[in-house]
Image: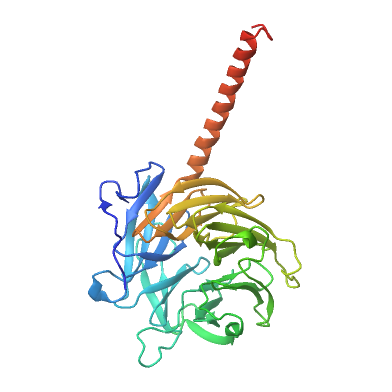
């Protein structure tokens, strides 16, 4: 069941007073529920989902359409689901809909119209995509949901297994089950992430302890890896767990994130139909001493991606070097989802019941300007020192 954050919320600043200080580069909007998942509609519009379980808690189970406009985050519309908690969302931009999975085994097709003038969310169809075992209140976890680039095929987890669904836009039965992929033979825990590659009909599944690459057409496993299967991660003093992954824009590289109590690691691996990760070189690096809790939802943009941490930070990581180039505190509690937007800023949600727009692009520009100013000051000081020693004449 949902538990309220222990920190005190300051309505004037939009943050938790005991853990955070106001930051002009972080714009927050307070939600009435703990957000667990998100999807981007555009650079300025976002779908957030989550909830508190039973309605008797007073905390809604909801998806919310949030907009960032003129320096302010605001709610445009929302849809409530009674006692059924939202656990996953996936945007299909080509069809202008979002799919929401819930704890009671349903998948809802929600229209956002895709027009800036529209402020309404509406449920178009509902499909029972996972069965509830007699005597249970919830179905096997449907946390992981993903759509192929064309928006015609959806992958939805059901505990440790994975089902393939065809999307029939405009039909009363919007989702038709095509088949099951035997991911349970590999995954012993619930699948936490599923993601299509931008090309080649490949997709990814991940639980805490194993990450796998699959061929969609054949349903066959291509290769797999574990959190410690890289040089830097192997030195971790604590057991690591996968916390997400994302593909490069061309689909040739996969970035994974793993975390333990002592910090978070990222690694990059080559991707292809004939790849074997056990024999391929892996580039990896520890990028934060705080555990990583979320990895960018979108493919790598402009050579960078975002991660969220247990300390409420959002970090921008350069893909080529795997260096963290920007770090800002956006939340007072662990980040549950984060994405780097096409604008260069980050949108994130966390257990502090806030969604946040972090102006990481502006922060990096300011840091760069300060760096140049510091170099110039050091250069002037060096000249003055040399002049005072008589080494040069001014």
- Which residue is at a point 63% across and 73% down the rendered structure image? 212
Depth check, front residue: 93 or 143 = 143
Q: Quadrant of the C terminus?
A: top right
Residue 195 position within the rendered picture, expressed as x and y whole percent measured from the top left = 57, 70
Residue 92 position within the rendered picture, expressed as x and y whole percent measured from the top left = 51, 68
| Residue situated furthest bottom in the rendering | 134
Q: Is residue 218 left or right of residue 340?
A: right
Does residue 248 appear in the picture of this structure? no
Does residue 9 appear in the picture of this structure? yes
Q: Quadrant of residue 128?
A: bottom left
Q: Quadrant of the N terminus?
A: bottom left
**Residue 90 in the image: above or below residue 27:** below
Depth check, front residue: 235 or 265 = 235
Q: Quadrant of residue 125?
A: bottom left
- Which residue is at a point 61% across and 81% down the rendered structure image? 186
- Which residue is at a point 53% across and 60% down the rendered structure image? 295
**Residue 75 in the image: above or below residue 133:** above
- Which residue is at a point 55% across and 60% down the rendered structure image? 298
């Amino acid at each position: 069941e949902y538990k309220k954050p222990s920190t005190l919320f300051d309505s004037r600043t939009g943050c938790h007073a005991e853990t955070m200080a106001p930051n002009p580069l972080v714009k927050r909007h307070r939600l009435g529920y703990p957000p667990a998942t998100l999807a981007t509609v555009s650079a300025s519009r976002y779908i957030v989902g989550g909830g508190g379980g039973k309605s008797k808690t007073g905390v809604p189970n909801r998806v919310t359409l949030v907009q960032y406009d003129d320096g302010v985050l605001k709610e445009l519309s929302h849809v409530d689901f009674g006692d059924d908690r939202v656990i996953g969302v996936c945007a299909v931009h080509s069809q202008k809909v979002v799919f929401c999975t819930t704890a009671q085994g349903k998948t809802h097709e929600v229209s956002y119209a895709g027009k800036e003038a529209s402020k309404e969310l509406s449920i178009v169809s509902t499909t029972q995509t996972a069965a509830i075992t007699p005597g249970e209140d919830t179905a096997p976890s449907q946390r992981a949901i993903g759509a192929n680039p064309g928006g015609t095929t959806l992958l939805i987890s059901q505990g440790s297994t994975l089902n393939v669904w065809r999307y029939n836009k405009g039909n009363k039965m919007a989702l038709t089950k095509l088949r099951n992929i035997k991911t349970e033979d590999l995954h012993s825990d619930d699948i936490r992430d599923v993601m299509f590659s931008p090309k080649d009909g490949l997709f990814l599944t991940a639980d805490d302890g194993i990450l796998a690459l699959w061929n969609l057409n054949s349903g066959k496993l291509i290769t797999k890896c574990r959190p410690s299967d890289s040089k830097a991660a192997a030195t971790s003093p604590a057991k690591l767990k996968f916390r997400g992954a994302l593909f490069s824009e061309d689909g040739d590289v996969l970035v994974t994130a793993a975390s333990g109590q002592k910090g978070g690691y990222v690694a990059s691996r080559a991707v292809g139909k004939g790849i074997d990760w056990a024999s391929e070189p892996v580039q990896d690096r520890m990028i934060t001493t705080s555990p990583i809790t979320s990895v960018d939802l979108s493919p790598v943009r402009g050579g960078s991606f975002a991660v969220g941490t247990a300390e409420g930070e959002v970090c921008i990581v350069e893909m080529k070097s795997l260096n963290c180039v920007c770090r800002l505190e956006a939340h007072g509690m662990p980040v549950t989802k984060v994405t780097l937007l096409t604008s260069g800023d980050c949108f994130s949600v966390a257990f502090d019941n806030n969604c946040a727009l972090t102006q990481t692009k502006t922060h990096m520009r300011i840091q760069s300007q300060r760096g140049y100013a510091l170099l110039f000051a050091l250069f002037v000081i060096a000249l003055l020192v040399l002049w005072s020693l008589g080494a040069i004449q001014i």
